[in-house]
Amino acid sequence: MIYYLYDLLKDFDLPGVGMFQYISFRAGAAIITSLLITMAFGKKLIGFLQRKQIGEEVRDLGLEGQLQKKGTPTMGGLIILASIIIPTILFAQLDNIYILLMLITTIWLGLIGFADDYIKVFLKDKKGLAGKFKILGQVSLGVIVAATLFFSDEVVVREKQRDIHGDFRKEILVNQETGQQQVQFVTKETKSTKTTIPFIKNHEFDYAWLVSFMGENSRKIAAWLIYGIIIILIITAVSNASNLTDGIDGLATGTSAISGATFGILAYVSGNIIYADYLNIMYIPQVGELSVYIAAFIGATVGFLWYNSYPAQVFMGDTGSLALGGALAVFAVIIRKEFLIPILCGIFLIENLSVMIQVAWFKYTKRKYGEGRRVFLMSPIHHHYQKKGIPEAKIVTRFWIVGIILAVITIVTLKMR
């Protein structure tokens, strides 16, 4: 909203108004606003939740300090949602297709998480929202995201054009004032289902290649189906993995902040034609605007840590964890870096895999030996380390360190190919 003040006031030549046209300024304003919202309203919301006795029900799993968490306010994800949505609406271009998709994603998954928390807290049903309804909500969102990215004419990439010999075409531009010549590649905006593969020199993969053997009439439908299925799997997997990671104070919040900051860098360079050309990565017009959203995302997660770090004064609940994971997934898909998720969101991946391994091995050994056996002392894996007697705060800090290492590796992939 404030962004559009520039269009209204630019003719009045007021000092400072021109700053609103710069993404970097609006991203900075978004992160500051997001932090202020969490600081200003976080404590008030915690007080409200305490008065309404909206506290966490804790099962006794034999973990040190676990029962002390009983009654800690939950549904704090409302703070995160407000701190993301409000700054984005204020400072981003609301007619940008990518911004709209991210707002829809945040609200959509936030509502699913809110429904789950509401059932647990107010209806006293520990199971929460039935799993099939969660999956249905995630799949529905995946269909919306995939359909928008696949069919919308606003979603394009700028590709280098080749000549009849297969070489990239170049053109010479002459500066009329200095007479200097500059050689640049000939590019064209086009619809594409290409994405980025890390560590590979020609690092682009086209989903349409998977159906290239089919006839022309059915190829587009098949490409859309494959693309849609992949997007649905990514959104479902990452949002649920974030939910699993939210098991000890500050773990999911800090990990999300690290991943968000890294994706913000990738979005900025992907949406800047100069940096994209220098790094030889896919240039995606208009995607740089996502820097404003991700700045608000970072501010929301870092600000929430003020209350969520050990010992937590409030838990985000599914209201926050589903929204954070889903937002990271959709963001990665939009900037065409979804294959970087296993690296950058490696903590989420490990948490998810630990549960899958534990369940699969328990079922296998119970069927084979008549008694279920476990790989980990408890899953997700952060509980395994708690069972080993490592303090909760140390586990979180070490996981953050691993997350930072993975973030550095992700950035390095821009040049390692």
Image (cartoon, grey):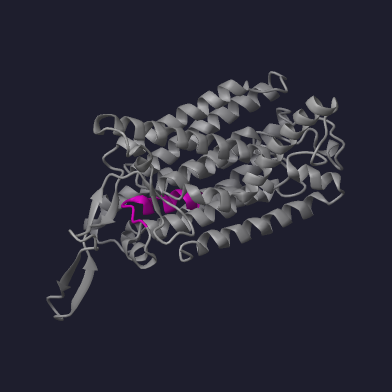
Query: Is 181 a magenta residue?
Result: no
Quarter the N terminus occupies: top left
Please state the horizontal and vertical placement of residue 264, each as a whole percent of the image.
47, 55
Closest to the observer: 417 or 81? 417
Please state the horizontal and vertical placement of residue 126, each as a whole percent of the image.
73, 23
Residue 140 left/right relative to 46: left
Residue 104 left/right relative to 159: right
- Kindly identify the residue that appears in the image at 26 percent across and 51 percent down: 7
| Residue extent of the magenta highlight | 282-296
Residue 67 drawn above or below residue 388: above
- Kindly identify the residue that appears in the image at 28 percent across and 55 percent down: 159
Number of labels in the image equals 0
Please state the horizontal and vertical placement of residue 344, each as a whole percent of the image.
56, 53
Residue 254 drawn above or below residue 141: below
Residue 283 left/right relative to 370: left
Closest to the observer: 164 or 239? 164
